[in-house]
Image: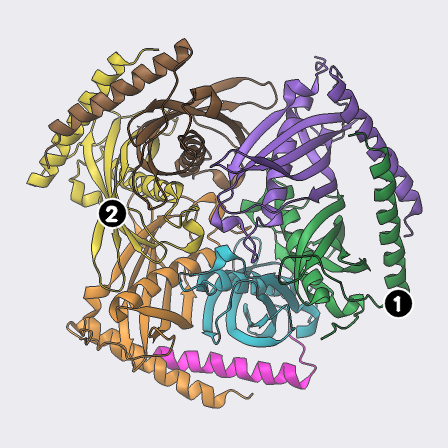
Chain colours: A cyan, B orange, C green, D purple, E brown, F yellow
Amino acid sequence: MKKSAKTPAETAIETRYVLAPHMVNALGTAFGGVIMSWIDVVAAMVAQRHCEGTVVTASVDTMSFLDPIYIGDHVILKASVNYVGRTSLEVGVTVNKENPINGRQNPTTTAYLTFVHLDNDGQPTDVPKLLLETEEDKRRHENARARVQARKELRKKIRK
Amino acid sequence: MKKSAKTPAETAIETRYVLAPHMVNALGTAFGGVIMSWIDVVAAMVAQRHCEGTVVTASVDTMSFLDPIYIGDHVILKASVNYVGRTSLEVGVTVNKENPINGRQNPTTTAYLTFVHLDNDGQPTDVPKLLLETEEDKRRHENARARVQARKELRKKIRK
Amino acid sequence: MKKSAKTPAETAIETRYVLAPHMVNALGTAFGGVIMSWIDVVAAMVAQRHCEGTVVTASVDTMSFLDPIYIGDHVILKASVNYVGRTSLEVGVTVNKENPINGRQNPTTTAYLTFVHLDNDGQPTDVPKLLLETEEDKRRHENARARVQARKELRKKIRK
Amino acid sequence: MKKSAKTPAETAIETRYVLAPHMVNALGTAFGGVIMSWIDVVAAMVAQRHCEGTVVTASVDTMSFLDPIYIGDHVILKASVNYVGRTSLEVGVTVNKENPINGRQNPTTTAYLTFVHLDNDGQPTDVPKLLLETEEDKRRHENARARVQARKELRKKIRK
Amino acid sequence: MKKSAKTPAETAIETRYVLAPHMVNALGTAFGGVIMSWIDVVAAMVAQRHCEGTVVTASVDTMSFLDPIYIGDHVILKASVNYVGRTSLEVGVTVNKENPINGRQNPTTTAYLTFVHLDNDGQPTDVPKLLLETEEDKRRHENARARVQARKELRKKIRK
Amino acid sequence: MKKSAKTPAETAIETRYVLAPHMVNALGTAFGGVIMSWIDVVAAMVAQRHCEGTVVTASVDTMSFLDPIYIGDHVILKASVNYVGRTSLEVGVTVNKENPINGRQNPTTTAYLTFVHLDNDGQPTDVPKLLLETEEDKRRHENARARVQARKELRKKIRK
C-alpha cells in the first residue's frame, strides 16, 4: 500500500518542557546535551509520522545555541519536515524559551536534522512525497536545498 | 596574566563508556540524544582546557551518525581543538565503538562543535592561540576553516 | 497590577513524548511514575500560565490508567484549566497514545490536579478568573465542581 | 493452589529515601513527579505481595501534598492494603519527612492507589482475601469503602 | 548539648526497591553501580541518624556481590551501625532479593561503609557512643573491630 | 582458540567526566553513588578487555574517598589490571579531580574491584595470564596479593 504524500503541517509537532534543576550545567544554564536530546526525540517523532515507519538519525546540521535557558523557563520545541530526498528527509526544529510569569518568548536554538527511513529489514527505503502548500513551506524547502547543496560542496573541500 | 598558546595534543581528551540498556531507543540501538550529550560534554572539557576558563556551546555543525551502537558496545570518544577564532574555537569529536570481546573498532559518529569563551562577566573574550605542530593538526585546521567559510556562504543563501 | 482573566484555551498545552525503553516496568509497559511525572509537569505549566506566577501541587484526584503504553508509542498530553477557586485551580490532563506507523490514537490516562497559587512570600494568593467560552469549557467546569463537591462530602465520611 | 488470605501487616512495607538536589523543582522543593514515582513503586510492591503475582496501576485517588520536602530531608513511605475487591485492591500510602538532625517527623503526603491483579494471560483475576485484625485495619477498610462509594456516586454526576 | 548514645536498633533502616529495566547491565542483571548507590544512600542515612548531623563517606570496605538480581525482583536493604570510633563510624548493609510471587528471599550483597562525622565548619567531630545491647550487636561490633585491625595491618604491607 | 596473555598497559583505560549539578548530595559535593557507578563501569570495561569476554563484579575492596569533588570539576578515572587469579582478576582504579581553569589535579578516590570471568553458560572460566613488564606493574601486583592474603586472614577472624 502506497504511503500518502503529506504537507509539513500534517506531521508537525509542538511540545513544551520546564527546565528543571537537574538539567543545568555548572554555569546554571541548560546543559547542551539535554536540549540536544529533546531536539532529537521531537524531530524523530515528526520524521516517523511523515514516513509512517522507522527512521534513524543520519546527521545533525547547524544546531545553533542563541540564548541561555534558565531553571524554571518553559522550553517550547516546534518541529516540521522541510525537505524530502529519496530515502532521507530533513526536519527543522526551533526552540523558544518562555518566561512563565510574563509569557515573553525568546528564540534559543535552531536545528536541522536528517533522518533515513528504514524498511522492516533495516534497509533505506522510499520516503513519501512532501506537499508544499504555504509560502513558509516553500521558503523552508528552498533553504533546506541550500543546506544540502552546501554540504555537498563542503565535502569536496574536506581533505581526508 | 596571559594564557599560553597550546597545541591540540595538550588539551585533547579520550574517554570511554559502555552502552547500557537504558540508553537505547525503541530500535535497540543507541539513543541519539545520549551520544549527543556525551559529545557535548567531552568537547566542552577540551574547550575549557584550551581556554583555561568558561565556555558555552555556540553551535554543533555536521554531526554524522555512521553506524548504530548496540547494548554492551564500548564507546570511545576522542576530542581535540581544530581551530581557534578570536573569541570562539572549534572542537572535533570522533566516536568509535569497540566490541569488547574481539577488540574491533568501527567509526560511528563525527562531530564539530563551536564554543565561545566567556570572561567572568559572561562576555566573549580572547581565546588563547592554537599551535599547529603535526601534519594532522594542519589538516584539521584547514578543514575547520573550510567549514567556517562554508557556513558564511550558506548564511548568504538562506532566505529569512 | 491586576492579572487578566483567561479562557482555558489561552493557557492550554499539548505536548508529546516517545516511550523509551528505560521508561517501562518489569511488564514492558509504561512505568506509572513516568506518566505521573509528565502529567504533573504539564499540568503545572498550565497552572503557572493561568496564574502568571508560582504554583504548587496540592492534590491529584482520580488519575485513571485505561490502557497500557508500549515502547515506541508516542504519548500525547493535553492539559487545560477546568475550574478556578479563590487561591486554587483544577487542571485536567488527558493522555493519549499514538501508534507512529498508522497514526491511530487511544486514550490511556485522565487526571485532575489541583494547584495552589503562591505569592512571593510563599503564601496562597488570588487566582485570576476563568472565562468559560465554549460548551466544552462549561461541561468541564461543571464536572470539576462535582469533584470538589464529592471531595467535601467524602471528607465528612472519613473516620480519623 | 489457592492463595492465602492475608492481614495488611503481612504485606506492609516501610521504605526511606533522601531528597537529593536533582529531585527538586524550580522552587527548591521536592518535584511532585519524584514523590509520585516513589508512591507508585512502593504501593505496587505491597499489591504484588498481597496478590502473589502481577498487578497494574488502575487509578490514583486523592493524593494530597500537605507540606513541602527540602533537599536533605529523609522521606519515609509506609504502604499497606486497605481494601480488597474481586479483582482489584486499594493500597494506602503515607509519606512523612524526617529531619535527620533532630529526628522530627512531619506528614507530607497521603495517597490511595487501586491496582488490578492480572493472571498469566494478562486478564483480571481473583485477589486473595484481606483479613482485618486490628481496629486500625477496620478503620482503613471502612474509609476505603467510603472512597469506592464516593467514586461510584461521582461517576453518575460527571457529564460526558 | 551533648548528643545521646544510641543502640544500633535505634537508628537502623530497612528499605525496599524494585529492580526496573533501566537498572540492568548488558547481561540483564542489576548494574553494580545502582546497587552501590542504594547502599551508599541507605548507609549514610543511618550514619546521619546516629550522629544527629552531617556525615561523608570515607571508605567502602568489602562490598561482596553474591547472587545476581533480575528485573522485577524486590531488593531489600538493611543497614545499622556496627562500630563507632572517635570521629568515624562503620555501618553494615545487607542486601537481599525477594521474589514477589513466592516471597522467597536470598542474600545478594553485603557491604561495610565508614563515614566521618563533620561539624558545621566541615571538620571531623566526635561521634556519639554506641550502646551494644544484644548478642548480635556485640558480634557485629567485634567483626567491625577485626576489619579495622585488618586494614591497619594491610596498610603496613602496601608498598607505595 | 586460546586467549592471549596481556600486560596491564594493553587493557588500561583513562576516562574523564564533569561533575554536573545533578550529581551532588545535599552538601554540594559529589554523591558517593555516582563516583561508585563510574568506577564500576570503568573497571568492568578493563576486565572485559583483559578476559575478551563477560565479567561480573564479585567484590569491591577498600574504596577510599580522600577529597570531595565539586560541581564543574573534571573527574579523571584510570583503571588497569593489577592481579589475575584462576577465574577472577583485580582491577585498580584511581580517581583524580582536575580544576579545568588551572589544570591542577588532586587524588580523590582509589578502589580495587574483583571480577569473575564467565563463559557462555554463565560459569566461571579461566582468565588469560597477566604479563608484568614494568616495576609499577610488579608493585601493583604485589600489593594486590597482599590484599588477597589480608582478605583470607580476615575471613578466619569474622564470627558468623
Q: Which secondary structure, mark 2?
A: strand
**Residue C43 shows in the view:** yes
- Which amino acid is tagged 1? Thr
Q: Is residue F77 above or below residue A37?
A: above
- Which amino acid is tagged 2? Ile
Horizontal side of residue E141 vs B68, given as left or right: left
- Quarter where residue E74 is shown: top right
Query: Residue at the front extreme?
Result: E1
Q: Which residue is mark 1?
A: C134
Residue E144 is situated, as x and y percent measured from the top left of the image, at: 30, 20
Residue at (24%, 18%) from the top-left corner?
F154
Horizontal side of residue F148 vs D42, given as left or right: left
Residue F30 is situated, as x and y percent measured from the top left of the image, at: 37, 47
**Residue C95 shows in the view:** no
Q: Which residue is mark 2?
A: F13
Label 2 packing within 10 angstroms: few (<14), some (14-19), many (20+): many
Q: Is residue C122 magenta?
A: no
Residue A159 is situated, as x and y percent measured from the top left of the image, at: 28, 76
Q: Chain of mark 2?
A: F
Residue at (40%, 12%) from the top-left corner?
E136
Query: Residue at the bottom extreme?
Result: B156
Between residue B137 and residue A90, name the one nearer to us.
B137
Q: CA distance from mark 2 to mark 1?
A: 64 Å
Q: Is residue D1 above or below residue D67?
A: above
